[in-house]
Image: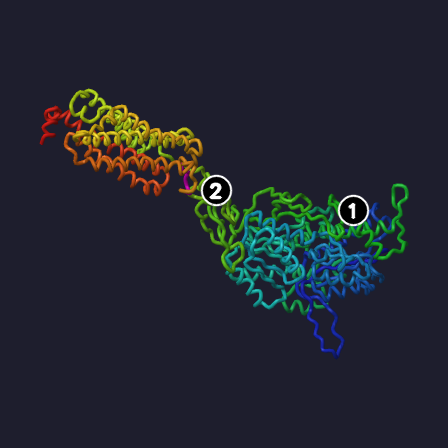
Amino acid sequence: MDGDYVVGGVFSIHNYMHTVKYNYTTMPEPLRCMGSIDSREVRFSRAMIFAIEEINNSSNLLPGVKLGYHIYDSCASVPMAAHLAFQLANGQDPEFSLGNDHNCSQSGMVMAIVGESGSTPSISMSRVLGPFNIPQVSHYATCACLSNKKQYPSFLRTIPSDQFQANALAKLVKHFGWTWIGAVRSDSDYGNNGMASFLDAAHREGICVEYSESFYRNNPRSKIQRVAEVIRRSTATVIVAFAASGDMRILLEELSREPSPPRQWLGSEAWVTDSQLLRFSFCAGAIGIGIQQAVIPGLRDFLLDLPLTKVSVSPVLTEFWESEFNCRLDQSEEIVLTSTGESLCDGTEDIQTLQSPYTDTSQLRITNMVYKAVYAIAHAIHNAVCQKTNSTRECDKLTRIDSKQVLTELKKVSFSQNGYDVSFDANGDPVATYELVNWQRRASGSIEFVTVGHYNASLPVGQEFHISRNLTWMEGGTQVPASVCTESCPAGTRKVLQRGKPICCYDCVPCPEGEISNATDSPDCFPCSDEFWPNAERNTCLPKPVEFLSIHEVLGIILAAFSVGGAFLAIITAAVFFHHRTSPIVRANNSELSFLLLFSLTLCFLCSLTFMGAPSDWSCMLRHTAFGITFVLCISCVLGKTIVVLMAFKATLPGRNIMKWFGPQQQRMTVVSFTFIQVLICIIWLVVSPPFPIKNLTTYKERIILECALGSAIGFWAVLGYIGLLAFFCFVLAVLARKLPDNFNEAKLITFSMLIFCAVWITFIPAYVSSPGKFTVAVEIFAILASSFGLILCIFAPKCYIILFKPEKNTKKHLMNKNES
């Protein structure tokens, strides 16, 4: 249809182009389309006509100016698209009118072009139209490459770029927790560039791709079969398909021949909202990105207003009519048709009853993109030819403008049509908004498109998606299917990548000792702090149990019982001796030193109690000093008794009067002197570097040992060494006195007691050094108790036996008789 200003239109009404044979001797036959007609694309072309007629009838937009149109079929092929681009740029050949009049249109350069439906044809057209500054506004070319204004300076579009769609698909995959997917794409600019953008976005989201296959509708069937077989053999449950609708139909037909395991399809807008593909029931549950639905008032009535008079003058509409109603309009072929059993179109065909994508206006998506593209061009022409006077614009259809002016104005347009905003950014792209579409099965068994959410790329990161209703998944499931190479590693393990496989394929290795991971799929484990230790699952750090020798545990109770029992034994022994203090056996064995020895043994037994319980500053200082002083007091008493025995024997020899130097006063001074030296050592130790409580974190990794640090090790070993020196000296003297007469047989008892004492403390040293934790304290207590029991039993048990059970032997006469014998 001619007009004051002409708008071009290019649509993929057919999907194939007739193969032209070149023999280079004759003129090649003209390019022509072939194959079945795409009724959806017919609707797009008719929507363009509807928009132009609506604009021509408008009193606000281009008043007094008539827009014309020239619409072509590109066959979705690059050669035809390039040919049409040159034809539109140079001026058109006469074409049959699609309007009510049957006049031929006039030649003239178009102001702008709507189209093409595919990215690859659009690229070829834009490369031709760009140098001439002829604006091209596509309704369906989504390749992100077309946003490059250096290569495609005159290209704009009303549909968002695939870059936004690719990002949305990657975020959608991430949102549902899928990390292991398959990918198929059209082997075209749309598929290859779209999938490249998606894979890049998926990589940033940590998503792995098991395979990425490309195909095209013109490929040999063997290639399509190979892609289908890859899908059937794959382990990925989710398949992302970035493909054109025609290509996807070929693949799904191949997959339907031999059922594959259930697959969750995730689709790009090019095919996921194509109602012609709903017949593939095994794709039920598919989700994808779709262009927003729209309502265009009056469009359905316009589409259905298609009388045979209008159809017959258009080859495209004629082919569409014949295809949909399976009849022929050409009456000249009546004989041939009737002979083949086909019917003629007789005018009774009712398009109102036609179930076709052409008449399906329930979900206008891409159709609205065509509608917006036409209005954007109209607004640009309006701004170029209409001068503003007062509050209105007056348009002069005689104003001569060129396509460059329209392009300039087109980049600046910003308006709202039917509630939908139209504007372009610096790259010629609109604001990216999508619907989340889900293929859901009705109760009747048919599949329908259901909008379950929205995506708006202009919103802040993390807020782009809004899912408003429940989704259904493959096989009618209500739970999100899993698609991972390896199941998530639970807390307490870490991921270790499998050699030669993507990062989503890994082994789950338990955290090493002392380390935890408290998150799913943790790449590393980290150690607990010093006072914490992992639980059995190694997913959290718990405070380490604190260990010390407690008086409430079995070992502590046993040792405490022996300690108290030993103290009572010493007290009872002292009571027996005190009660029989006038008896010969008590008097003959230096009763004063005996009582002092029993007192020191009582303290030795009781000092072991200071080693029990949680260490504190005072208990650490008390336990070592009390032990050192009481044992020196004890050994000093034994040493005093031994010296007295020896000196008493020497004093019985003629001419000897030695006992005057070893009377009671001297004995007391000996004990006090030896003990004072130990007291002095302990004081120096406590002043210089006293013992103090510490938390031992090294002996055991999994628990804390509360113990007393020695402070100065020299002080500790000086205390022990002094005790050992006195014990050794006492042992030597006792050995020398062991063969004295029976009156002085206490020397034999002291010898045995010192032998036991020295044996205990010699074995104590390696046992003390090698015993871990609280057993170090237990060994020390055991050594104290063992040596104390050794002294009291060896020295006092025989005497108590005689006092209590053999009183007849506890007489001076008996002792003298023994001496005489």
> Measured along the vertical axis of the image, is residue 572 above or below residue 501?
above
- Give the extent of the magenta segment: 700-705
Residue mark closest to the camera, 2 vs 1: 2
| 406 or 396: nearer the viewer | 406
**Can you tell which quarter of the image residue 717 is in?**
top left
| 45 or 529: nearer the viewer | 529
Amino acid type indicated by mark 2: Cys
User: Looking at the rendering, in which quadrant would you find the N terminus?
Assistant: bottom right
> Measured along the vertical axis of the image, is residue 698 above or below residue 102?
above
Magenta segment main secondary structure: loop
Q: Secondary structure at mark 2?
A: loop
| 9 or 517: nearer the viewer | 517
**Can you tell which quarter of the image residue 794 is in?**
top left
Task: Tell me, yes or no, if residue 150 can be seen here.
Answer: yes
Q: Position of residue 193 (x, y in %)?
A: 66, 59
Q: Position of residue 464 (x, y in %)?
A: 64, 45
Disc 1 crowd rating (10 Å Cα; few below 14, some 14-19, many 20+) is: few
Q: CA distance from mark 2 to mark 1?
A: 60 Å
User: Looking at the rendering, in which quadrant would you find the C terminus?
Assistant: top left
**Can you tell which quarter of the image residue 726 is in?**
top left
Q: Position of residue 707 (x, y in %)?
A: 40, 35
Amino acid type indicated by mark 1: Ser
Q: Secondary structure at mark 1?
A: strand
Residue that badge 1 annotates? 414
